[in-house]
Amino acid sequence: MSAIAKEILSKSASTVPLITRSTQPKNLYKALKVMDQNGVGETVTTTKLLNKGFKDCYYKVTKVKLRGPELNHGRAYGIEVWNGKVLNNGQPVEIRGGLKWNWIKYTPTTEHVAQQVKAE
């Protein structure tokens, strides 16, 4: 590496933005790509559902296939939970509306988690 390149890198290293886990709403694929393992194992929901007052309505992500130059598109699959009840016998389904709505990471309420533990 040339001396000029080293000098430029040393001066710009402090100004390089870091990618952080943002809680800002994004499309599903932008939200998943910054999570560990592309979001597999995480729970996500749309801000639309939260704004309408729906509690414990989310997807637990099981599989993600990201594509595109910036990994902003793709397919995601997960276990759908609606009002605390697992749908489709716990089988993963394609998460619809990944580009249509804003998605955020979701933490289920403690009551719902306690019900799942009792059921198992």
Image: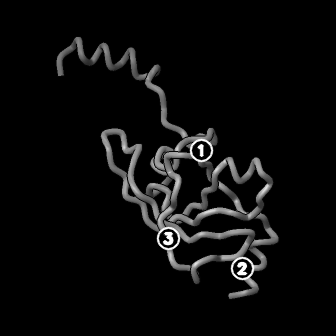
Label ID, residue 102: 1
Label ID, residue 35: none
* Of labels 3 and 2, the one closer to you: 3
Say whether disc 3 or disc 2 marks the residue closer to the N-terminus: 3
> On the rendered image, what quadrant is the N terminus found in?
top left
Residue drawn at (72%, 79%) of the image: 116
Give the alpha-carbon distance from disc 3 to disc 2, as whole Å: 20 Å
Q: Which residue is mark 3?
A: 93
Mark 3 touches mark 2? (CB < 8 Å): no
> On the rendered image, what quadrant is the C terminus found in?
bottom right
Q: Amino acid at mark 1?
A: Asn
Mark 2 touches mark 1? (CB < 8 Å): no
Q: Amino acid at mark 2?
A: Gln
Please determine whether, in this image, residue 50 is positioned above or below residue 25: below
Give the alpha-carbon distance from disc 3 to disc 1, as whole Å: 19 Å
Give the alpha-carbon distance from disc 2 to disc 1, as whole Å: 27 Å
Say whether disc 3 or disc 1 marks the residue closer to the N-terminus: 3
Mark 3 touches mark 1? (CB < 8 Å): no
Please determine whether, in this image, residue 7 is positioned above or below residue 52: above
Residue drawn at (49%, 70%) of the image: 93
Residue 74 coordinates in the image, percent (x, y)? 38, 53
Q: Which residue is mark 2?
A: 116
Residue 67 coordinates in the image, percent (x, y)? 33, 49
**Judging from the image, what secondary structure is the residue with disc 1 in?**
loop
* Of labels 2 and 1, the one closer to you: 1
Say whether disc 2 or disc 1 marks the residue closer to the N-terminus: 1
Q: Amino acid at mark 3?
A: Val
Residue drawn at (52%, 64%) of the image: 61
Quarter of the image holding residue 108? bottom right
Residue 118 coordinates in the image, percent (x, y)? 76, 85
